[in-house]
Amino acid sequence: MSEINLGVRYKATVVSTALEQDNNGKPYIYATLKIEDEAHSKRIYLTEAAMGIARAQLKAMGFDCDKYSLKEIDENPLLLQHQECEVDFKPWESNDGVVLQINGIYGKKEPKTQDFISKLDSELKAAKGTPTKKKTKAPAAKKEVALPEDGSDIPF
């Protein structure tokens, strides 16, 4: 694979998925994805705190959580094979130094239509000479501090 850039989404194809548990007993989906002829893996944890993210990432790989059971992934590691999605990477410090690993799995973006682009072009051109108005805050009111009548300093 050519150089990986952070903040860039890459096209990926699902190779396989498996339902696993880590050493602490936490369940996860072990997903293997192919990005430009190289295999990369991602653990998608199925803990209570991670269920929303897990659901979104499984959906991005073509798995409908409302229609199917994880039993199907467990019984058929190739169930999602050839499904397309997008991924991005993040640095991760390992015993071998800093390596890049898959950060997130996302659904494929729909291609932009020419009508969509033309409409945005027109809106940009029409906006020429119409600056946006800045919202300004009123200055904070000064608070009056009562000083002792005898002229002494304020005791702290």
Image: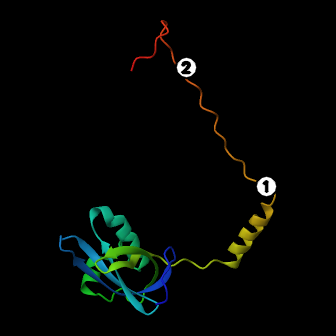
Q: Nearer the viewer, residue 49 or 73?
A: 49
> What is the residue that sits farthest to the bottom in this orientation?
37
Q: Nearer the viewer, residue 112 or 12?
A: 12
Give neighbour class at mark 1: few <14, some 14-19, many 20+ (Cα, 10 Å): few
The location of residue 107, given as percent across then percent down, is 47, 76
Q: Which residue is mark 2?
A: 144
The location of residue 30, given as percent across then percent down, is 30, 80
Q: Amino acid at mark 2?
A: Glu
Residue at 22% from the left image edge and 70% from the top image edge: 26
Side of 128 relative to 95 (left or right): right
Q: Amino acid at mark 1?
A: Thr
Labels in figure, total: 2
The location of residue 68, given as percent across then percent down, is 32, 77
**Marks 1,2: beta carbons within 8 A:** no
Could you say whether the residue bearing mark 1 is in a helix, strand or loop? loop
Give neighbour class at mark 2: few <14, some 14-19, many 20+ (Cα, 10 Å): few
Could you say whether the residue bearing mark 2 is in a helix, strand or loop? loop
Q: Is residue 75 above or below residue 107?
A: below
Q: Which residue is mark 1?
A: 130
Residue at 40% from the left image edge and 77% from the top image edge: 102
The quadrant where residue 33 appears:
bottom left
